[in-house]
Amino acid sequence: MPTFELTVNGQAQALTVSHTASLLHVLRNDLGLNGPKYGCGLGQCGACTVWVDGVAARACVIPAHGVAGRAITTLEGLGSRGDWHPVQQAFEDAQAAQCGYCLNGMVMQAAALLAREPHPDAARIRSELSGNLCRCGTHVEILDAVHRAVV
Ligand code: FES
């Protein structure tokens, strides 16, 4: 099993995990970070989205050892109660959750977009979130939340 280091939410982590362990598995099962969710496991739903060096990525299809030395940010690293990231705050303000399972991916993807492009228009926001699925159909509230976060 490979041994390697990751920086997760600003903290160095030394890990020894199997070659087949996904980044999502390591974050949830070894590091107890349950913000990223297991949805499809195939890179198709976005529930597992994290940032790798600031870029939104699907943790379920990334081998953990493949991101050795990189900086990983999870929902927990984005903000916390009392100190929410503006996108997290906007989702709360917009009451954008129904079951909430997709919200990790929606928030991480939207926050990555706004970090790159602070003033995206509606079409750009829709395009950015088009790969993040919400089975409840809460897309109207989710898009409203992202618009609220645009300053
Ligand atoms: Fe990773 Fe669906 S669980 S994209």
Image (cartoon, grey):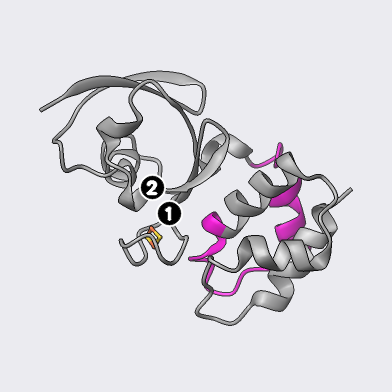
Give amino acid for label 1.
Cys
Does residue 78 appear in the picture of this structure?
Answer: yes
Label disc, if present, on residue 116 of the rendered structure? none
Q: Which image quadrant for residue 14? A: top left
> Where's ligand 1: which quadrant?
bottom left
Give amino acid for label 2.
Ala
Identity of the residue furthest to the bottom in this view: 137
Q: Is 80 displayed left or right of 58 in the figure?
A: right
**Quadrant of the drawing holding the N terminus:** top left
- Per the image, the residue denoted by label 2 is 59
> Is label 2 in contact with label 1 (beta carbons under 8 Å)?
yes
Residue 149 position within the rendered picture, expressed as x and y whole percent measured from the top left: 81, 53
Q: Which element carries disc 1, helix, strand or loop?
A: loop
Residue 133 inside the magenta-drawn segment: no
Q: Is 20 displayed left or right of 137 in the figure?
A: left
Residue shown at 73%/62% (left/top)? 125
Beta carbon of the mark 2 residue lies under 8 A of ligand 1 = yes
* Front one among 123 and 58: 123
Q: Which image quadrant for residue 44? A: bottom left
Q: Image height check: is 80 above or below 67?
A: below
Identity of the residue furthest to the left in this view: 1
* Front one among 52 and 12: 52
Residue 95 inside the magenta-drawn segment: yes
First reached walking from the N terminus: tag 2 or tag 1: 1
Label disc, if present, on residue 48 of the rendered structure? 1
Residue shown at 34%/67% (left/top)? 40
Q: Which residues are magenta?
A: 81-105
Does residue 95 appear in the picture of this structure?
Answer: no
Q: Which element carries disc 2, helix, strand or loop?
A: helix
Crowd tier of the residue under label 1, counting other residues whose Cα lies within 10 Å: few below 14, some 14–19, many 20 or above: many
Disc 2 versus disc 1: distance between alpha carbons? 6 Å
Q: Image height check: is 92 above or below 32?
A: below
